[in-house]
Amino acid sequence: MNIIPAPSTLDAAQSRASVQTVPTPGPALREPLRFALFALGVGFLADALFRGGAVGLGVNVPIAVVSFLICLFLLARREGVAPKRAALALFVSPLLFFAAMLAVRANPSLAFCNLAGCGILTLLLLHFWGDGDPFTASFGAWLALPWKALGGTLRAAPPVLSRAGGQVIVHGERREQYAAVGRGLLISLPVLFLFGTLFANADAVFAARIHTATAWFFPSDWGAQTVRFVWTAATAFLATGGFAYALTRRETSASASKAPSASLGMTEAGVVLGTVSALFGAFLATQTRYLFGGDAHVQAAPNLTYAEYAHHGFAELNIIAILTLALIGGLKAITKRETTKQSRTFSLLSTILLALTFPLLASAFGRMTAYEAAYGATELRLFVDVFMAWLAVGLLWCGATLWRTIPGGIGVYVCAVGFLVSLNVLNPHREIARRNLERYQRTGRVDRVYLATLSEDALPELIRLRASSVPDDRTLLEEITGRDALDARPRAWGAWNLSRAQGRRLQEANKRSGTRALAPTFSGILETR
């Protein structure tokens, strides 16, 4: 006789089963040797493009990214693992965009951000390639996913390499055949060396080609060659792990992200939101004139400088806006809302708190604007402006999730990608040059030393001074672009960059015309040395 357990007993059993589920391993790779060979090819390509890190960043980055993606697609097709459309839609386009911008912009700070963005997007693409839904990931999960993918990549490589090594070992007749080929190669080495030496002595061109072909095995600089070997091996190791992680990772009931259990009552959450909103309101009521006084407030207040006005409270106001997002997101995750009324009350209180946060963020933006008007634009100030704009977008996104069924965690990704895309489109160094030159036209004041540190991205704005009929403008141009020549040392083709190439063409044109160089001094830790 079948005994049907009571509903409570059945629910408890199912609950325990869901908690005790053992993660199932992903599917085994069919051809691990193919993975290792593809990864080795990626390693040699990385050496050719970057030469152990000795070559700067430029067109080599998009070439490397596209090559890696092609290998990943080919291996996935061979293994029968179709990529998730969500992963392709969310990660491939921005990855290619940021890689391409490394070959367009010469700004070192922006290049560092683009390189970091490429790395993080690659890890996210590997994580969601075969399984998982990025739209359901929580806020905390998005912050942890790159580290999780990196750890999975490092763990996936050794087993694949071990199995690939096992495939190389042959037995029986085939083993004897390979051994015979090996003995033949050993016998041919001294013969090849003898004839190769004679041919090299007979023709200088052939000798140069022999030297190039054998430079990897007989380098003139063993230290540099060791670095290149480690670079190639490390790249191949990471590529092996990345390919394997992307094509074998599978979500399980134990590893899938779950929302934390609701443990806070609506009354407690309402008190927290209400008291914090009251504090925000009191602060705004007592500090309205100071928060939004701007230029008039600085001039009216004795002993108050623009620097003090901008710095005093600026960081705190931005931190408050960020903590507000974290507070609402955390309360939303752990608060029990058992009725429709409770859900609406929670959404209303959270919306009020968000509404009170916007004036604080607007005040911080106004302070930075006043500071820039007084002292000029810099890269850090421009980055902060763009960051605050996307922080406001994050606040709006958070508010939308309170009233509509919109995934909240994906908003973190959208704002982060939007921030970096905005910087690339804005072109920080050109925008900084434009703002400072406009300020110079209005006030006659400009930081010549700072403008001289901008990269070739600023050239389109600086060139405008040459057409000016005002002698002081042309003098300013000569002071800013005071270096007589760009670094004429040869660069590897992989480090080619559009802005730097335009700067060199302009330099050559000025040399032919006998005029002073217009290309500014630039300090690039990421450029070729």
Image (cartoon, helix red, strand yellow):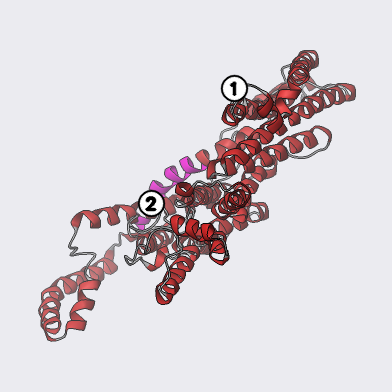
At mark 2, the secondary structure is helix
Left or right: 344 in relation to 129 = right
**Residue placed most toward the observer, 1 or 194:** 194
Location of mark 1 (residue): 303
**Residue placed most toward the observer, 365 or 38:** 365
Quadrant of the image occupied by residue 339:
top right
Q: Which residues are magenta?
A: 149-167
Location of mark 2 (residue): 237
Left or right: 176 in relation to 137 = left
Residue at point 19%, 59% (across, down): 221
Q: Identify which amino acid the numbered label 2 is placed on.
A: Phe
Q: Nearer the viewer's eye, disc 2 or disc 1?
A: 1
- CA–CA distance between discs 2 and 1? 60 Å
Q: Is residue 347 above or below residue 181?
A: above
Q: Is residue 255 above or below residue 241?
A: above
Queried whether the magenta region covers residue 150, the answer comes back as: yes
Residue 197 in view: yes
